């Protein structure tokens, strides 16, 4: 008891070093992977794309070089491009037509809350799906099919067009692969958005899904969860329907249910559908990140117990395209690092960050924009394709994952309410650690920018390493640090990763890379609103 108190006292101690406010924390780093380490997928960071403006992301006559380059940066770090899911709300408003070449869509007028509204109706032809060939080689995809319209003929037409596109020579040669078909987006909201009666139940959902997905699976020859193309299940918006409920209703015993390989749920930490004022500091919070993810624990466990993979198939900070001053800021990049690594810790294999053209929470803006994403005002000159602050989160995350395909993660106990930490292991051995200081340093902040000092304390891991092994790691390890450097949490630009900016016309880094040598016996400093990756 006395000892615990003493530790708390020491670690909470704040003192001043040459006029700067520095608090010291002592972090225990296991040198080998502890029990309960989670596998890190090379595609942990993946993307979901709103279906209505899909051709803008890929290009039509030739590939969109900006999208390609921005995705390829990520692919180079883990050896695998992010997975791409195309669908979301517009998935349930899309019809296939034999007479449309690529896409015809109608969009409502923009307004200040929603400068880039979603299409209300979308008609696509076969060539729409074969634009998938413009993604980086090796990209794996999930395509959405319309369940909202409750029209089996259209759902089957869409699925045939999707599978047919991936059988064309052009898509085959591109090396882009179809992994899954998702029948219906956020069906738990259908009773609110008019796609089903207001008394529609989860029982009716299961029967409806089995009917439409059954016809889809049969038409395109999907029979089991071990087939090359399988079905993605659930894709619910909130806790309206849950994976546990549909398992209990026997969905996995139905013919299409036997072809479900992955269960998807969606999560946003708030919603900006009618505007609102969201404080950035409420997002830069360890407690809020954890509170928004631990709600899925029972569904993750139930999914894994059925032998299925669990993902967040659509996620981001604030629903309805993000909120200004939060989703588009540097603070959101730090939020995204902690959120994604926390998701991995909970057994969520992949987190698909939702993107649309002109959305506030995008990592990537793929085309030139004429209207402000913040309030819809005219941009003169227009804003060319660019990466947004959250893009830098992916650079840290994918460097943390590395390219061996073998990395595992644990969360580290960090005794500071604003600082989170994670360690990565390869072949059981400690290789990297990431620390995120969510303490918000804003343009309005005054005084000295606070900092925490992190001391490393290497410890025995799961394999009961000898003290000799620990001492030897400590004495022989060399380390370098790379950082996401941010001027202010509420900045909407001007970040760097390892000394380089990616805010360039082609998403290629500019500037001299900065690798800081770390003296492990001295530890590191981490400023408020900064993240660091230490490689051992
Ligand atoms: C950190 O942990 C080490 C090893 O347990 C201990 O010797 C040291 O006093 C601790 N430092 C602080 C600041 O808690
Ligand atoms: C269902 O979709 C087919 C094919 O698009 C269309 O011809 C038919 O009119 C639709 N049925 C209804 C009830 O909307
Ligand atoms: C839902 O409401 C409709 C009338 O609007 C009714 O016919 C139907 O039986 C109700 N369904 C359930 C499950 O209560
Ligand atoms: C989710 O995150 C939001 C914004 O950070 C926060 O306001 C909310 O309290 C969090 N929810 C939970 C359940 O922790
Ligand atoms: C921007 O304006 C140009 C010229 O009017 C137009 O061609 C382009 O489609 C517009 N882009 C968007 C995203 O609206
Ligand atoms: C955590 O960060 C917030 C601002 O984001 C700050 O008000 C608070 O004092 C910080 N807590 C500690 C212990 O540093
Ligand atoms: C980026 O930094 C430059 C130089 O410090 C500054 O002039 C500019 O206003 C910053 N831009 C944003 C969007 O913060």
Image (cartoon, grey):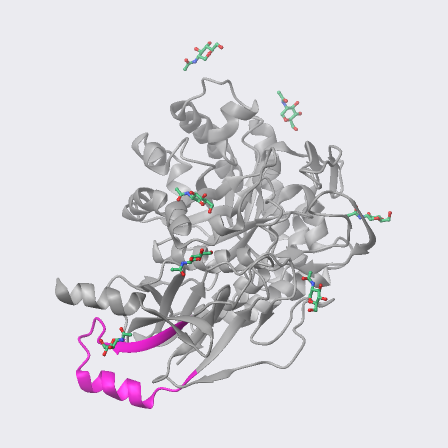
**Where in the figure is residue 201, as x and y percent of width and height?**
41, 22
Residue 224 seen in this snapshot = no
Report the front residue among 243 and 410: 410
The quadrant where ligand 7 appears is bottom right
Q: Quadrant of the N terminus?
A: bottom left
Q: Residue at x 52, y 27 (%)?
A: 190
Front-most of residues 374 and 191: 374
- Measured as percent of width and height from the top left, residue 11 is found at 29, 68
Q: Work out whether residue 446 can be spotted.
A: yes
Q: Quadrant of the C terminus?
A: bottom left
372 sits left or right of 209 in the view? right
Q: Please identify the quarter of the rendering in which residue 347 is found.
A: bottom left
Task: State the extent of the magenta-drawn residues as a range.
Answer: 452-479
The image shows a total of numbered marks equal to 0
Up the image or down, 53 lies above or below 80; here it is: above
Question: Depth check: 113 or 148 in front?
Answer: 113
Residue 381 position within the rendered picture, expressed as x and y whole percent measured from the top left: 84, 55
Residue at position x 37%, y 35% from top? 242
* Magenta stretch contains residue 463: yes
Q: In the shown orientation, is residue 95 left or right of residue 448?
A: right
């Amino acid at each position: 008891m006395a000892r615990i108190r003493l530790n708390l006292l020491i670690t909470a101690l704040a003192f001043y070093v040459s006029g700067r406010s520095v608090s010291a924390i002592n972090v225990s780093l296991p040198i080998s992977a502890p029990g309960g380490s989670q596998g890190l997928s090379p595609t942990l960071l993946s993307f979901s794309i709103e279906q209505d403006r899909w051709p803008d992301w890929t290009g039509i006559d030739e590939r969109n070089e900006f999208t390609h380059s921005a995705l390829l940066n990520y692919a180079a770090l883990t050896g695998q491009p992010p997975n791409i899911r195309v669908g979301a709300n517009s998935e349930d408003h899309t019809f296939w037509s034999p007479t449309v070449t690529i896409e015809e869509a109608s969009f409502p007028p923009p307004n200040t809350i929603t400068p880039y509204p979603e299409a209300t109706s979308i008609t696509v032809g076969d060539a729409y799906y074969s634009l998938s060939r413009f993604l980086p080689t090796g990209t794996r995809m999930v395509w959405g099919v319309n369940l909202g319209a409750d029209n089996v003929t259209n759902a089957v037409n869409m699925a045939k067009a999707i599978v047919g596109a991936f059988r064309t020579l052009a898509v085959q040669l591109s090396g882009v692969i179809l992994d899954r078909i998702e029948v219906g987006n956020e069906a738990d909201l259908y009773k609110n958005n008019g796609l089903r009666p207001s008394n529609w139940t989860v029982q009716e959902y299961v029967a409806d899904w089995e009917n439409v997905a059954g016809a889809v699976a049969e038409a395109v020859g999907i029979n089991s969860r071990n087939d090359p193309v399988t079905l993605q299940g659930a894709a619910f918006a909130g806790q309206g329907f849950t994976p546990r409920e549909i398992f209990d209703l026997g969905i996995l015993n139905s013919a299409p249910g036997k072809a479900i390989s992955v269960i998807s749920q969606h999560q946003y930490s708030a919603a900006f559908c009618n505007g609102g004022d969201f404080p950035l500091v409420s997002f830069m919070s360890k407690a809020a990140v954890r509170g928004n993810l631990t709600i899925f624990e029972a569904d993750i466990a139930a999914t894994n117990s059925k032998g299925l993979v669990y993902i967040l198939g659509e996620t981001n900070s604030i629903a309805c395209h993000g909120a200004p001053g939060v989703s588009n800021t540097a603070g959101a990049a730090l939020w995204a690092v902690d959120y994604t690594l926390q998701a991995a810790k909970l057994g969520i294999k992949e987190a698909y960050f939702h993107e649309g053209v002109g959305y506030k929470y995008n990592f990537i803006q793929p085309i030139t924009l004429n209207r402000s994403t913040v309030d819809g005002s005219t941009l003169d000159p227009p804003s060319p394709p660019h990466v947004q602050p959250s893009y830098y989160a992916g650079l840290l995350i994918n460097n943390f994952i590395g390219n061996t395909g073998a990395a595992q993660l644990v969360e580290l106990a960090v005794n500071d309410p604003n600082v989170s930490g994670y360690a990565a292991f390869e072949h059981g051995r400690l290789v990297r650690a990431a620390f995120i200081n969510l303490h918000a340093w804003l343009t309005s902040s005054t005084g000295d920018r606070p900092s925490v000092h992190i001391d490393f304390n290497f410890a025995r891991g799961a394999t009961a390493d000898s003290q000799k092994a620990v001492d030897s790691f400590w004495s022989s390890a060399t380390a370098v640090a790379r950082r996401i450097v941010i001027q202010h949490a509420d900045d909407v630009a001007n970040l760097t990763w390892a000394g380089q900016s990616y805010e360039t016309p082609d998403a290629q880094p500019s500037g001299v890379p900065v690798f800081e040598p770390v003296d492990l016996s001295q530890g590191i400093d981490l400023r408020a609103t900064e993240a660091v990756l230490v490689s051992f």
